[in-house]
Amino acid sequence: MKAPTTTVVLALLVSLAGLSYLLTAGTSSKTEPVIGTEPTGAVPASPEPGFDATVTGNGLGNVSEKVIAYYFHGTIRCPSCLDIERYSRQTIYDSFFQELYDGSLEWRSVDYDLPRGAHFSTDYHLSLPSLVLVKFKGDQQVDWKVLGKTWEFVRDTDALVSYVRDELLVFLAEDT
């Protein structure tokens, strides 16, 4: 006996809805920063896949000291890696807009699996995707810090946001 077309379509839709729910269950957090609120005009086109162009200020001043917040990742990305990058980036945009605007802080996302980014794994002793803060005076790197607890907080958005914000505040305040 052949089932009516409407019944087959309805069963298929219900099955797809159930599958979609199962695939996304447990991936949301209590609070999520609003994505897409980056400073207007601050993100130029990426010059190469896997490398975000510098997200920086208005170009009005020559900053002699700055911090670059790098998110280093591989080419193949898991949902947790993407979440850490997204929440870290959004925290920096939300909490450090003035520093981004005046050029004393930059955000860069770098794929360390690409030849151009491969040296970063060695330079900063990275074994997994990581947020790294790097301080420069002029063209000289003077300090750096791997925020090693980001993976501990991947399922606790509030803790991750606080950790990134607090660590960056301390790093910006340190005199090197």
Image (tube, grey):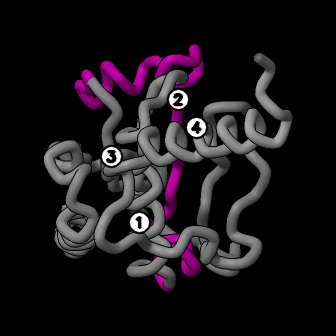
- Quarter of the image containing the N terminus? top right
86 to the left or right of 130 = right
Q: Secondary structure at mark 1?
A: strand
Q: Disc 2 designates what residue?
A: 111
Q: Residue at the spot x=50%, y=81% of the render?
A: 97
Q: Amino acid at mark 4?
A: Ser
What is the quadrant of residue 57 in the picture? Answer: bottom right
101 within the magenta span: yes
Q: Disc 4 designates what residue?
A: 15
Residue contact at pointers 3 and 2, CB within 8 angstroms: no
Q: Residue 66, relative to residue 141: is it above or below?
A: below
Sooner in the amino-acid sequence: mark 4 or mark 1: 4
Q: Amino acid at mark 2?
A: Asp
Sooner in the amino-acid sequence: mark 2 or mark 4: 4
Task: Give neighbour class at mark 1: few <14, some 14-19, many 20+ (Cα, 10 Å).
Answer: some
Mark nearer the viewer, 2 or 4? 4
In front: 26, or 100?
26
Sooner in the amino-acid sequence: mark 2 or mark 1: 1
Residue 68 appears at what percent x and percent y? 43, 55
